[in-house]
Image (cartoon, grey):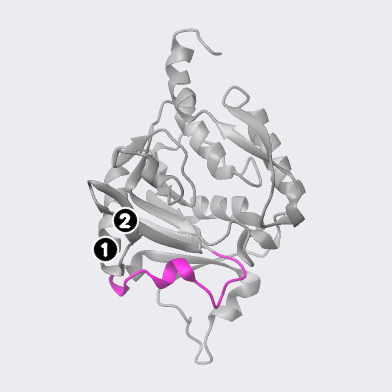
């Protein structure tokens, strides 16, 4: 299983990568843009970070197209894509839902778990830190996940990539669920980021108009399972209201049975 970290505008601030132990670095691929490659090269001509690299052509813009490029150019059937600004957490025990930071020597167990799940699941993920302690179970099927996207590409028949500019991960997950392919999300582990629109990353190109258009597009692609809601924006876009989505993940998965029985569609 390969671990891909698409990144933009953060050549000197690779948070996610920095916590990976050296023993795992040969399976980690930093996905950089061609116009930023020189920022990752030291004066001796070697890359500054110990890992593999994938250089994306300049015409590939935005996270949706970059993730599509990874899908189309990887040689591995099992992949995990990570945001570049993540910290990982673990519950203090199976009976204690409080979280602590995941130590580097514990990373192999987390990614080994995802690798094992991808033997039987088309898509897997890790819970967000926010709200993790409201879920009793150590793993849940067919619910929301983001920032950590694990895929078995051998199970991607019929999935269309790059259909939306933002929330493309939601689109892929919904396509798989509607095919009757369940997801599995770990709640024993969790992940979090400092800000959803911090400097660098998607903030370099994602405007409120692009965000809102993505929400509308996702709704139009999955109208029975995606509802548009308006929310206040506290940390970006000068507090302007933005369109967000509420997704019925389990209903999307169950719709496959409904389809067979002449239900929803």
Helix, strand or loop at mark 1? helix
How far from the left and from the top, in percent, is residue 230? 70, 37
User: In this orientation, does residue 158 appear?
Assistant: no
Q: Which mark is residue 90?
A: 2
Q: Which mark is residue 106?
A: 1
- Residue at horizontal 26 percent and vertical 63 percent from the top: 106
- Can you say which quadrant of the picture contains the C terminus? top right
Boundaries of the magenta span? 7-23
How far from the left and from the top, in percent, is residue 80? 41, 53
- Residue at horizontal 66 percent and vertical 60 percent from the top: 203
How far from the left and from the top, in percent, is residue 5? 48, 62
- Magenta stretch encompasses residue 39: no
Which residue is at the far bottom? 44
Q: Nearer the viewer, mark 2 or mark 1?
A: 2
Q: Are discs 2 and 1 less than 8 Å apart at CB?
A: yes
- Can you say which quadrant of the picture contains the N terminus? bottom left
What is the total number of numbered labels drawn onto the structure image? 2
Quarter of the view holding residue 90: bottom left
Q: Is residue 239 above or below residue 179?
A: below
- Magenta stretch encompasses residue 15: yes
- Residue at horizontal 51 percent and vertical 32 percent from the top: 175
Q: Main secondary structure of the magenta part?
A: loop
Helix, strand or loop at mark 2? strand
Which numbered disc flags the more N-terminal residue, 2 or 1?
2
């Amino acid at each position: 299983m390969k671990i891909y970290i698409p990144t933009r505008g953060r050549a000197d601030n690779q948070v996610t990568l920095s916590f990976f132990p050296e023993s795992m670095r040969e399976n980690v691929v930093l996905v950089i843009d061609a116009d930023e490659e020189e920022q990752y090269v030291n004066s001796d001509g070697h890359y500054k970070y110990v890992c593999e690299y994938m250089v994306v052509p300049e015409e590939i813009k935005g996270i949706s197209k970059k993730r599509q490029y990874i899908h189309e150019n990887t040689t591995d059937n099992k992949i995990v894509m990570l945001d570049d600004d993540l910290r990982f957490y673990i519950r203090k025990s199976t009976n204690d839902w409080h979280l602590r930071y995941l130590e580097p020597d514990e990373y192999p167990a987390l990614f080994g778990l995802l690798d094992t799940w991808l033997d039987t699941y088309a898509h897997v993920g890790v819970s967000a830190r926010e709200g993790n302690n409201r879920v009793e179970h150590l793993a849940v099927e067919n619910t929301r996940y983001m920032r950590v996207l694990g895929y078995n590409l051998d199970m991607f028949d019929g999935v269309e990539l790059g259909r939306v500019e933002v929330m493309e991960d939601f689109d892929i997950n919904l396509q798989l669920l509607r095919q009757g392919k369940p997801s599995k999300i770990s709640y024993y582990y969790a992940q979090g980021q400092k800000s959803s629109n911090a400097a660098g990353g998607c903030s370099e190109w994602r405007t409120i108009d692009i965000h809102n258009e993505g929400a509308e597009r996702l709704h139009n692609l999955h109208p029975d399972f995606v509802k548009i809601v308006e929310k206040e924006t506290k940390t970006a876009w000068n507090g302007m209201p933005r369109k967000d989505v509420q997704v019925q993940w389990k209903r999307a998965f169950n719709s496959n049975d409904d389809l067979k029985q002449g239900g929803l569609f």
